[in-house]
Image (cartoon, grey):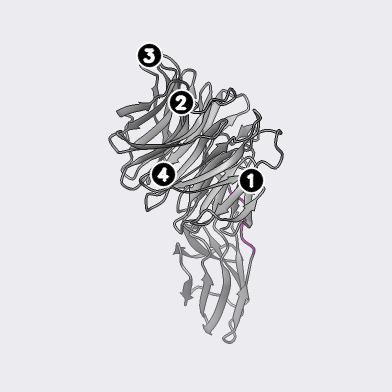
């Protein structure tokens, strides 16, 4: 539906007209690409050409599926451990050159080991470049992965316990690999109980941010949201923990994390969403809980969970909420991705649990404000307005009879019309 700004034109004398209309709160889906997979659609990444990549698990194999910008499947590849045992895909990212990186775990009983952290690199055509792993004496897994501008990889997850507690099954783990898969450093957070890294992000300086769960209580089910910052060399910069206000009622978990170009850190999880400054100090929080979080160039925040996607501005004010385009689809997975043009990508799953999907949402243009029309002379008018978004592909000007006068380019804020205008006629400007 077009969003109109109306100007009633009376060609009499120079008069200024101004309108301020409400922005658009809906987020229409551009496409939903359906495919079949037995287990999960876990994570999503999008490259510079808006090809999207989903990782998950199908039976005992990790799989990666690539879609083009129109939602057509380009290829699918899968990975199973060399011992032909279970492998699971949890996290995916893509670098500026189009290389794809994945993490999860693989079973390696052929080496006398249990589940090991699995990391792999693929080229843009699904050709495997290398795989590597990280193993301790028991269960280990990579849960999230990101890449910096130099091609270095950062993985978080958990490794087997480093403390003697019968309830502990993991220690929060972070590792850095170079672009060739060589391990650079590792670091851990080891509380007295189970700890796990669920989300990871890296800023332009190479500093790393993780979120997850830290269980430092004495009960099996307690747990708190932990957020940490490390330098590019793996040194701890700060830690903040949001304590469970209802101990013994189940763990609260940090699920995903994002960092803006200005250095603000946004984490979401099972008890809400939080913004921290560069030093780890809490600036604001909202009770909206998410599985995935992303931030755009204007520092708007996008949060997804199984039922909806919500957009907040940088101050935590609600902008809009949208749901899956089909009522039987859950917005599953641990991630959401937003591009600078406002397009939003999430993985999904149908309620039958056998069908998975990738979903692309296209943000509707926000209606311009501050619209003025100044009559210069009979038949000539100068129009101007404030362009409030970068989501439009252009503007069109119509008469009240829906007759097209002109198409204008995106980000246009000024137009001088000298022909084709009529007295006592309404005209409207529509962002496309």
Q: Which residues are magenta?
A: 22-27
C-alpha span from label 2 to label 4: 32 Å
Is 202 on the left or on the right of 20, as rendered?
Answer: left
Image quadrant in which you'd find residue 424: bottom right
Nearest the eye: 336 or 147: 147
Instruction: Point out which mark residue 50 bears.
Output: 4
Determine crowd level at label 4: few under 14, some 14-19, many 20+ residues with C-alpha closer than 10 A: some
The label nearer to you, 2 versus 3, is 2
The residue located at (52%, 34%) in the rendering is 196
Q: Secondary structure at mark 1?
A: strand
Q: Secondary structure at mark 3?
A: loop
Instruction: Point out which mark residue 140 bears.
Output: 2
The answer to which of marks 2 and 4 sits earlier in the sequence is 4
The answer to which of marks 1 and 4 sits earlier in the sequence is 4
Q: Is residue 118 above or below residue 403?
A: above
Which residue is denoted by mark 3 in the rendering?
83
Determine crowd level at label 1: few under 14, some 14-19, many 20+ residues with C-alpha closer than 10 A: some
Nearest the eye: 342 or 135: 135
Is 161 on the left or on the right of 148, as rendered?
Answer: right
Determine crowd level at label 3: few under 14, some 14-19, many 20+ residues with C-alpha closer than 10 A: few
Is residue 4 visible in this depiction of the protein?
A: yes
Marks 1/4 in contact by CB < 8 Å: the verdict is no
Which residue is denoted by mark 1 in the rendering?
272
The label nearer to you, 2 versus 4, is 2
Determine crowd level at label 2: few under 14, some 14-19, many 20+ residues with C-alpha closer than 10 A: many
Residue 256 in the image, given as x and y percentages of width and height = 53, 42
In the image, residue 307 lies in the stretch drawn in magenta? no
The answer to which of marks 2 and 3 sits earlier in the sequence is 3
Residue 359 in the image, given as x and y percentages of width and height = 52, 38
Residue 211 in the image, given as x and y percentages of width and height = 52, 42
């Amino acid at each position: 539906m077009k969003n109109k700004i109306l100007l009633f034109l009376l060609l009499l004398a120079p008069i200024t007209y101004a309108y301020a209309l409400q922005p658009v709160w809906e987020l229409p889906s551009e496409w939903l690409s359906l495919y079949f997979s037995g287990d999960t659609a876990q994570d999503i990444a999008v490259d510079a050409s808006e090809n999207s990549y989903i990782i998950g698990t199908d039976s005992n194999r990790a799989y990666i599926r690539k879609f083009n910008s129109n939602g057509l499947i380009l290829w699918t590849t899968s990975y199973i451990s060399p011992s032909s045992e279970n492998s699971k895909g949890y996290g995916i990212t893509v670098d500026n050159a189009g290389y794809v990186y994945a993490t999860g775990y693989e079973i390696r009983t052929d080496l006398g080991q249990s589940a090991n952290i699995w990391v792999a690199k693929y080229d843009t055509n699904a050709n495997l470049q290398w795989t590597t792993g990280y193993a301790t004496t028991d269960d280990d897994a990579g849960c999230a992965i990101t890449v910096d501008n130099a091609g270095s990889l950062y993985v978080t997850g958990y490794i087997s316990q480093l403390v003697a507690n019968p309830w502990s099954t993991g220690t929060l783990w972070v590792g850095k690999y170079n672009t060739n898969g060589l391990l650079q450093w590792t670091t851990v957070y080891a509380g007295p109980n189970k700890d796990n890294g669920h989300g990871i992000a890296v800023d332009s300086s190479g500093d790393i941010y993780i979120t997850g769960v830290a269980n430092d209580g004495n009960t099996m089910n307690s747990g708190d949201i932990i957020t940490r910052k490390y330098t590019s060399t793996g040194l701890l910069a700060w830690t903040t923990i949001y304590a469970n206000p209802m101990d013994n009622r189940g763990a609260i978990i940090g699920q995903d994390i994002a960092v803006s170009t200005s250095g603000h850190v946004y984490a979401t999880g099972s008890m809400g969403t939080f913004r921290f400054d560069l030093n780890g100090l809490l600036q604001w929080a909202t009770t909206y809980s998410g599985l995935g979080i992303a931030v755009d160039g204007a520092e708007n925040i996008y949060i997804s969970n199984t039922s909806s996607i919500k957009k907040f501005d940088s101050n935590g004010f609600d902008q809009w909420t949208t749901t899956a385009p089909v009522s039987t689809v859950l917005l599953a997975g641990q991630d959401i991705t937003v591009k600078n043009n406002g397009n939003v990508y999430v993985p999904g799953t149908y309620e039958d649990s056998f069908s998975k999907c990738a979903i692309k949402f296209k943000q509707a243009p926000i209606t311009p404000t501050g619209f003025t029309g100044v009559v210069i002379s009979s038949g000539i008018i100068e129009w101007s307005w404030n362009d409030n978004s970068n989501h439009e592909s252009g503007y069109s000007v119509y008469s009240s009879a829906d007759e097209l006068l002109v198409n204008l380019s995106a980000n246009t804020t000024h137009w001088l019309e000298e022909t084709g205008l009529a007295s006592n006629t309404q005209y409207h400007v529509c962002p496309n």
